[in-house]
């Protein structure tokens, strides 16, 4: 079981933007985030009308 709790996508993205991440590109509901000195990664932005939480296993590494 993961030590990470689930969080809403909006809250996770806000925290990432606050520490220097930015949107490199967006295709549909997938956003590629970038930050200097880090590998890019993709997050799936869930529909705002859903209550489904954003979990750490929804991160897909981009190489």
Image: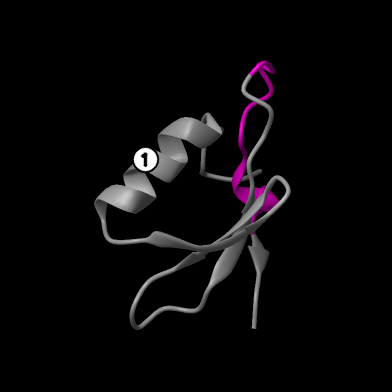
The residue carrying mark 1 is: 14
Q: Which residue appears at 65% of the width and 75% of the height?
A: 62
22 relative position to 18: left or right: right
51 relative position to 7: left or right: right
Give the quarter of the figure containing the N terminus: top right
Q: Residue furthest right?
A: 28
Q: Which residue appears at 35% of the width and 83% of the height?
A: 37
- Closest to the observer: 18 or 3? 18
Q: Which residue appears at 34% of the width and 44% of the height?
A: 15
- At which x and y percent is residue 49? 66, 16
- At which x and y percent is residue 51? 65, 16
Name the colour scheme: one colour
Give the quarter of the figure containing the C terminus: bottom right
- At which x and y percent is residue 48? 62, 23
Q: Residue furthest left?
A: 19
Q: Which residues are magenta?
A: 49-59
User: Disc 1 on helix, strand or loop?
Assistant: helix
Q: How many marks?
A: 1
18 relative position to 61: left or right: left
Most common secondary structure along the magenta stretch: loop
- Residue 47: which quarter of the image? top right
Tell me if residue 32 comes above or below residue 10 in the rendering: below
- At which x and y percent is residue 58? 68, 49
Q: Residues within 10 Å of mark 1 (few under 14, many from 20)?
A: few
Tell me if residue 60 comes above or below residue 6 in the rendering: below
Whether the magenta-drawn stretch holds residue 20 is answered as no
Tell me if residue 61 comes above or below residue 17 in the rendering: below
């Amino acid at each position: 079981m993961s030590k990470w709790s689930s969080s809403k996508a909006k809250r996770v993205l806000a925290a990432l933007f606050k520490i220097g991440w930015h949107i490199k590109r967006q295709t549909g509901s997938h956003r590629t985030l970038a930050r200097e000195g880090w590998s890019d990664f993709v997050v799936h932005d869930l529909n705002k009308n859903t209550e489904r939480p954003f979990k750490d296993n929804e991160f897909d590494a981009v190489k």
